[in-house]
Image (cartoon, coloured by chain):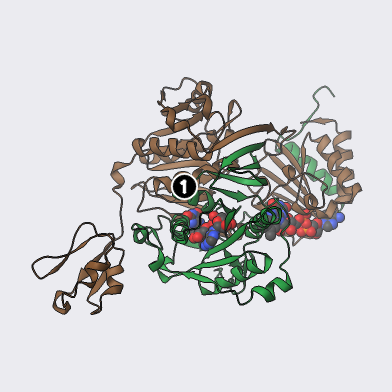
Amino acid sequence: MKIIVCIKQVPATQNVQIDPKTGSLMRWAATTKMNPFDLVALEAALQLKDKSSAEITVITMGPNAAKAVLTEALSMGADKGILISDKAFAGADVLATSHTLSYAIEALKIDYDLLLCGQQTTDGDTAQVGPSIAALLNIPHISYVRKLISNPNTFTVESIINDDRLIAEIKKPCLLTIDKDFAQARYPSYWKLIETINTPIQIITLADLKNPDTINHIGQAGSPTSVLKIYPPVHEVISKKLSGKSKDIVNELVDYLKDEHLIERNSHE
Amino acid sequence: MSRIVIRHEACTLCEVCLNACPFNAMENLNGKIEINSNCKVCSICVKQCPEKCISKIEDELFQVDRSLYKGIMVIGEMRQKDLHPVTLELLGKARELADKIKAPVYCMIVGEELLDAAQLCLSYGADEVFVCEDRELKFYRSDIYAKLISERISQIKPSVVLVGATPSGRSLAPRLAALLKTGLTADCTQLDILDNTDLIQRRPAFGGNIMADIMTTRHRPQMASVRYKVFNPIEEIKNPVGIIKRLSINPDELLSGINLLEIHHEAVSESITEAKRIIVAGVGVSDPEGLKLVHQLADQLQASVAYTRPLVERGLASYTHQIGLSGRTVQPELLITCGVSGAVQFISGMEHSEHIIAINKDPKADIMNVAHVAVVGDAYEILPQWIEALKKGSFHV
Ligand SMILES: Cc1cc2nc3c(=O)[nH]c(=O)nc-3n(C[C@H](O)[C@H](O)[C@@H](O)COP(=O)(O)OP(=O)(O)OC[C@H]3O[C@@H](n4cnc5c(N)ncnc54)[C@H](O)[C@@H]3O)c2cc1C
Ligand SMILES: Cc1cc2nc3c(=O)[nH]c(=O)nc-3n(C[C@H](O)[C@H](O)[C@H](O)COP(=O)(O)OP(=O)(O)OC[C@H]3O[C@@H](n4cnc5c(N)ncnc54)[C@H](O)[C@@H]3O)c2cc1C
């Protein structure tokens, strides 16, 4: 069985720093890590590999430094790492990212059974790239997968959609996005790390993407959405502060609930 | 758009490019290399040319003709036999946007037996409801739903398409956007529209730590997803005048790569997303005594109990009762937090509640900034007295 797992490098912290003087955002992306949701997707692939033989290819679109997440994936048990990197891919939104990833997947000519994505990322945070790739590759997809079994021509999966738990069979090849509660991801193995540290990472650039439509669908030019501005969230100001003796606080709370018609005194008393 | 140009004065007619071009887009016409309409701007010739006399230039980017698109469309969602309430909320927003630009509100619903749902959409602001009904469409399946809806959208040509950011909406919307080759802005919390029908979409990212304003100016339709409980429905219209159109479906449009084997409807036992009143227990009241007090207060106020993530992680409650970014978004008329610090991830799930009361020992806790009533004090002291006062005063809710 051949599995491709899409992984993304994200800033190590979500705690965006705000400049107290100007109120604008400060640089926060200095240190990076693998998107935690992608660790779970990789774990799902590794569990399939534990059960029967499987070849796992991890791919990421990103700058040269994103090789780090591929190396990490190899040390967890993935077999091959592919970096999709070119200046032309810069400024991509979900659609352009999905186009680039799907062209790269076509160019790799891997006869894959399964494409896996994380549930979402911790930076862009849209949860859209997986379903979007599936549409472009014209394969079915199921989101929020919690259990996964491989059959000869299909996968049987369990997923939770709204308040329904559903069990479905999906034809190979297909794309699944893995729910964060699928499993706890395993730790990288030190020995595997030593073993794989020199495994070459294949690099795919614009020139390798053979699809004739490529140029119109990648990078900034291929991105329908554009981020106009980014700023820290503003919260409503407080309207009332109560402190002091508990007894007084409780009286004020009861009055507040009455004033706002959230409780009424029983009329017959 | 980009295209290929040749500097003929530097060209030696070596014809390397002719042989390299995979699309037969280059010809030697009377001693001059010309590029024909087969060109896909793949740039292989640019790289191969030994004289470096071929280059790619960028023209203006693609820009759609906005005037060909009209109206705001809501993709309705069915939950069992009923319309998911997020559909009515989206129709409320769609009505507001459409009135601003004097455009119609459309709704599209896919499923089985949709007449009642379609009628409801008319009562909540839709001018025209398109229904795709078939037994095979009873449950959401990504491949056939997306294809069916995208093809209908291509014909109807709305300027804006809104989808509920429910789990199935989050699976459907990006697939739809990719088929329509257009932009989709996720989890919008605010939407506004300009006279030229460009939509201003505001959304949180980085787990709620930043907000972004996003626009899709060059493509149509502009797609946005919105979480449940962010917008409000309009008042029900008594005798709506809108129309319902049933769309025909080809049998081969129902062939899916997905076969649903079992569907278990998990009991929505006192679902917190529907609750009108909610008491939230945080780490500050997470021992048995604290939780007991929270439940007693909930009984007095006929409220549901919800939790912050650490309590769910400790197994004190189920995930379905967690509020926040990785839990549920709620918008009750009353929400009381006890021993909750107010992390951004928590606040993003409850900040639209009508009345927020926060009890916390720490006056500097972030929750105090979103509360309408910020109570500085020990929950173990205040809750018992409050419960007692409510009992004694014999109030009803
Ligand atoms: C503040 C902000 C808001 C944004 N909002 C939007 C928006 O609303 N709409 C929009 O179209 N774009 C938006 N973008 C751009 C978008 O986030 C990224 O450009 C896009 O590359 C990836 O989207 P994501 O991070 O949301 O991934 P998600 O869709 O959340 O990722 C899901 C999964 O897809 C896979 N994946 C994602 N990216 C990669 C990658 N580079 N390489 C390999 N696998 C990957 C992973 O398996 C991941 O778990 C926004 C960017 C910012 C900074
Ligand atoms: C990606 C991501 C997603 C997340 N999603 C969610 C989510 O969906 N929901 C969520 O809740 N969290 C989420 N979190 C976690 C979040 O960051 C916080 O850690 C969490 O909300 C804190 O819970 P808390 O307020 O109960 O606990 P704490 O932060 O520990 O706060 C306890 C509070 O209780 C007060 N207190 C203590 N004793 C008393 C007393 N006797 N009386 C009154 N007050 C008292 C303290 O002053 C303190 O403010 C997420 C985090 C990440 C990184």
Q: Residues within 10 Å of mark 1 (few under 14, many from 20)?
A: many
Residue B331 in picture, x, y percent from top left: 65, 42
Report the side of A222 relative to B189 (left or right): left
Whether disc 1's CB lies below 8 Å from ligand 1 is answered no
Q: Position of residue A86 (x, y in %)?
A: 43, 70
Of B219 and B197, the residue lying toward us: B219
For the residue pair B71 and A187, the one nearer the viewer reads as A187
Q: Quadrant of residue A169?
A: top right
Q: Is residue B91 above or below residue B207?
A: above
Q: Residue furthest top?
A: B239
Pointer 1 residue:
A135
**Camera sees residue B341:** no
Which amino acid type is shown beneath numbered disc 1? Ala
Residue A101 position, x and y percent, is 48, 59
> Which residue is at 39% across, 41% downward?
B100
Residue extending farthest right: B289
Q: Colour of chain A?
A: green
Q: Which chain's residue wears label 1?
A: A
Element type at mark 1: helix
Q: Is residue B166 left or right of residue A225?
A: right
- Indicate the quadrant containing the C terminus of chain B: top left, top right, bottom left or bottom right: top right
**In the rendered picture of this protein, how many numbered marks are placed on residues?**
1
Q: Which chain is brown?
A: B
Image position of A80 with respect to B262: above or below: below
Relative placement, left or right, of B205 versus B313 is: left
Residue A225 in the image: state x and y as whole percent: 43, 55
